[in-house]
Image (spheres, coloured by chain):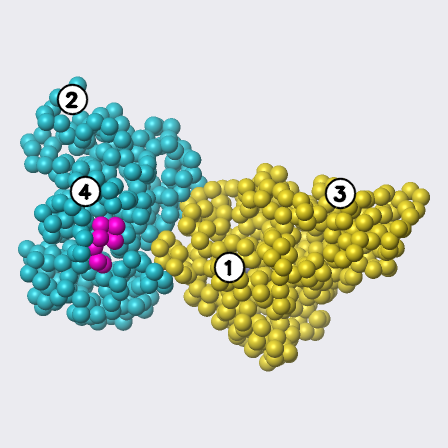
Chain colours: A yellow, B cyan
Amino acid sequence: MSTYLIRNAKVLGGDAQDVLVSDGRVAGLGTGLTAPEGAQVIEADGHVLLPGLVDLHTHLREPGREDAETVETGTRAAALGGFTAVHAMANTDPVADTAGVVEQVWRLGQQAGRCDVHPVGAVTVGLAGERLAELGAMHESAANVKVFSDDGKCVHDAVLMRRALEYVKAFDGVVAQHAQEPRLTEGAQMNEGTVSGVLGLRGWPAVAEEAIIARDVLLAAHVGSRLHVCHVSTAGSVEIIRWAKSKGWDVTAEVTPHHLLLTDELVRTYDPVYKVNPPLRTAEDVTALREGLADGTIDAVATDHAPHPSEDKDCEWAVAAMGMLGLETALSIVQQTMVDTGLLDWAGVADRMSVRPARIGRLDGHGRAVAVGEPANLVLVDPSARRTVEPSELASRSGNTPYAGMELPGRVVATFLRGVPTVIDGKLA
Amino acid sequence: MKRHLISAADLTRDDALLILDTAEELAHIAERPIKKLPTLRGRTVVNLFFEDSTRTRISFEAAAKRLSADVINFSAKGSSVSKGESLKDTALTLQAMGADAVVIRHNASGAPHTLANSGWLRGSVVNAGDGTHEHPTQALLDAFTMRRRLNAGKGDLEGRRITIVGDVLHSRVARSNVLLLATLGAEVTLVAPPTLLPIGIETWPCEVSYDLDAVLAKSDAVMMLRVQRERMNASYFPTEREYSRRYGLDEKRMAALPEHAIVMHPGPMNRGMEIAADVADSPRSTIVEQVTNGVSVRMAVLYLLLGGSEPAITTSEETAK
Ligand SMILES: [Zn+2]
Ligand SMILES: [Zn+2]
């Protein structure tokens, strides 16, 4: 296995150091390290070195929608975005609700090899919200599933949610809830507020998310279970989670990059690239989400990377699919909204995009300190770079990025997965 | 004027007055024995209807034909509209056919906006009603009707008090009317049960009341919106009877209106629900006039959008060169 000397890297944004990577691990750390014979030297020029990013929420679309994304293309996008591990959501076709399907996704990830793929198991059979899927079997499979979610749908039945929360305790699993009260969001097209009223689009009220989160934190407290809340999108949700954490309950939450930046004002264009679930909210919500991420109420940034082929987006709003790409732009959006605004330093970014998501997913090899002996899952970022997003240049099979034509800060220069570069010079290795 | 008419908000006060004045001129040809003008000869207007609305389609068709345009009626209902590519594919077809204007009716809010901004076609797009969003030519014909009855067919509607009653939440007519009437200086009050008003209504350029009786005495016009009986099943209101008792316009309520006030309805009506039959048929009712005025207003819109650089009407038939 090759040896790499990364020279002059600001580890977690601190002072510049040299980092020696050998045999899949960090083998040396300090200033003025000499390159061992045969080592490849990477001049970091003061770029920032972080632990490889971990995404708790990715839609890789395989099996079933290989026209939108595959494990192969999705993990390319992940590596280019600085990720070394992603959790692949269960709403595939067939649904990842059996050991067989999660093992299939697991193996596809192993074959692709650019990024660890951890399948998420469905909570209920077929995501139908009626009876539990074989959670234990998925956990015991080769995929070793620890995160369970019906994402795309809410586990809205309170009894079923309670049982799921309880059941996964046996193997330290966690239920990741897509919080959406179904009756309040029938036919919902966008955030319910001033803009939906003007546009005549059926509203998705904040209360539909907040009511489920409030119920779930109480349920989790009652049965003493872990709860993870997917893609928190409203100021009220942040408040409820802050309150739950203040009680000492084991509740974690994620926010997407797009909810940290974009608002429902964009829907005035009726451009379906902005159609996403949960929907883009208001500027006040964006502010509260940033604050929640900064103070740790929200534990993680998760992309909710949701590729869709052009025919599902190149149409009128009402029939367009919900979701947007995220893997290749997540770090730039976090830099723009959190770092460049002074809300979070790079150590904070490492915590919210690597350390905590790895801990929530119970991934032992990821989200580790950049220290001698640790697995060399690393990402080197140039924060001073600027780039304009061009959908056709993305590695994802789909092009539904809401940032097309936008100039974003930061660029992933290199990504290492257990000491092996998956990205070098900003290109796939 | 903009190239498309998607929202009443697309119209400045001058645009709106130009349309109303042009419509007023055009209305006079309806009184001639030969109702046709050669103005849009050789131009193609497509009526693209994804939703049934015979009355609106016929109105646009009559308007285009009186201007001598070629009219193609394209009813897309029943085709595979569940998937969106049909809108795109249809648009590309219409582009290939050389449509100069596409009049679109669609059950999805925003579909005309998407059609106009997608680059799929080059012609003008006229919104003939989209989902629960807007219906700008309805608002124009309503304003035309109010101006004739209240202002002798001239000027704007400055200071006129217009009350719009009913299912505002689901009404494209209400949205377009609020915007256009505000542009024309009218004072609009929306009246509905709170369940049938959208969130954020306080930001609209109008007043809101839950009490119809409180606003009738100071209304110059009352516009009753159609209320679908099915709304009852989704608990927007308890019963038909309660709705019509609280928000329906019956003779007693009509008597509370000022002498000059008119009663309007965009149709189709639910007689006995939002409007009593006697009220609908009373001399104050402009419901039949609204239909007639619709043709004149749509003629004006098509004429102005298709850039008739010549005057719409010349003194005789000499433009038929
Ligand atoms: Zn979700
Ligand atoms: Zn998702």
Residue name at image x 10 percent, y 27 percent: B315
**Residue lying at 22% horizontally and 46% vertically, measured from the top left:** B140
Q: Secondary structure at mark 2?
A: loop
Q: Residues within 10 Å of mark 1 (few under 14, many from 20)?
A: many
Horizontally, residue B7 falls left or right of residue A342, namely left
Is ligand 1 within 8 Å of the beta carbon of the residue shown at mark 1?
yes
Tell me: residue A63, above or below residue A353. above
Q: Which residue is mark 1?
A: A278
Would you place residue A128 above or below residue B149 in this image? Answer: below
Q: CA distance from mark 1 to mark 2?
A: 58 Å
Check disc 4 and give the amino acid type. Answer: Leu
Where in the figure is residue B204, as x and y percent of width and height?
31, 58
The amino acid type of the residue labelled 3 equals: Ile
Mark toward the start of the polypeptide (2 vs 4) = 4
Residue found at x 74% / y 49%: A47
Looking at the picture, how far across and down is residue A322, in whole percent?
Answer: 50, 52
Q: Residue furthest top?
A: B321
Which contiguous range is marked in magenta? B180-188
Residues at marks 2 and 4 on the same chain:
yes
Q: Residue at point 63% right, 48% down?
A: A409
Mark 3 touches mark 2? (CB < 8 Å) = no
**Mark 2 lies on residue:** B320
Residue where numbered disc 4 is placed: B20
Percent position (x, y) of residue A114? 73, 48
Disc 2 marks a residue whose amino acid type is Ala
The answer for how far apart the CA atoms under marks 3 and 2 are is 72 Å
- Return the residue at label 3: A424
Residue sitting nearer the eye, A188 or A169: A188
